[in-house]
């Protein structure tokens, strides 16, 4: 996986995330059908761009870092497949929030 990120880095204010894997079974061992799983709105930041330029030409850095856990909108993002793994690209402003590490 590390090789793919040496070749691919997000541009400007883009953030590359990996969505959490949905639970496939309940605690009791019952399989959850794909339609009932719902859309996963939490993800881990994998890579970030340098930031976007504001009206004065200054670079505004991205507000998250690699490794942060974030909350994503229900829809949006661009799907990217790297080494048979699915990732999503979002703009920094599209990310709804980040979770504090405890």
Image: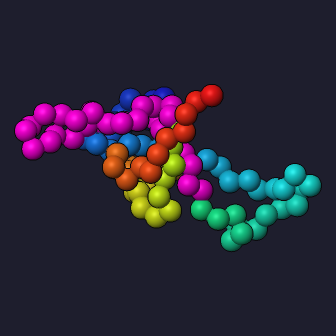
**Does the magenta run of residues contain 11?**
no
Q: Is residue 26 left or right of residue 12?
A: right
Image coordinates for residue 34, horizontal then vertical, percent? 70, 67
Residue 99 in sight from this viewpoint:
yes
Image coordinates for residue 53, horizontal then vertical, percent? 16, 40
> Quarter of the image containing the C terminus?
top right
The extreme bottom residue here reads: 35
Q: State the extent of the magenta-drawn residues as a range.
A: 40-68
Image coordinates for residue 45, horizontal then vertical, percent? 48, 38
Closest to the observer, 81 or 32 = 32
Question: What residue lies at 90% left-to-right and 55% top-to-bottom?
Answer: 29
Quarter location, residue 62: top left
Q: Is residue 41 left or right of residue 31?
A: left
Quarter location, residue 101: top right
The extreme right residue here reads: 28
Question: What residue lies at 41% left-to-right and 57% top-to-bottom?
Answer: 77
In the picture shown, does residue 2 fall above or below 36? above
Which SS does the magenta portion mostly show? Answer: loop
**Does the magenta run of residues contain 43?**
yes
Image coordinates for residue 8, horizontal then vertical, percent? 36, 37
Question: What residue lies at 56% left-to-right and 49% top-to-bottom?
Answer: 42
């Amino acid at each position: 996986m590390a090789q793919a990120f040496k070749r691919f880095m997000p541009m400007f204010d883009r953030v590359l995330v990996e969505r959490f894997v949905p639970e496939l079974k309940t605690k009791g061992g019952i399989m959850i059908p794909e339609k009932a799983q719902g859309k996963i709105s939490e993800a881990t930041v994998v890579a970030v761009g340098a930031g976007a330029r504001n009206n004065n030409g200054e670079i505004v850095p991205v507000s998250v870092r690699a490794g942060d856990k974030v909350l994503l909108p229900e829809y949006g993002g661009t799907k990217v497949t790297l080494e048979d793994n699915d990732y999503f690209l979002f703009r920094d402003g599209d990310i709804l929030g980040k979770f504090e590490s405890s």
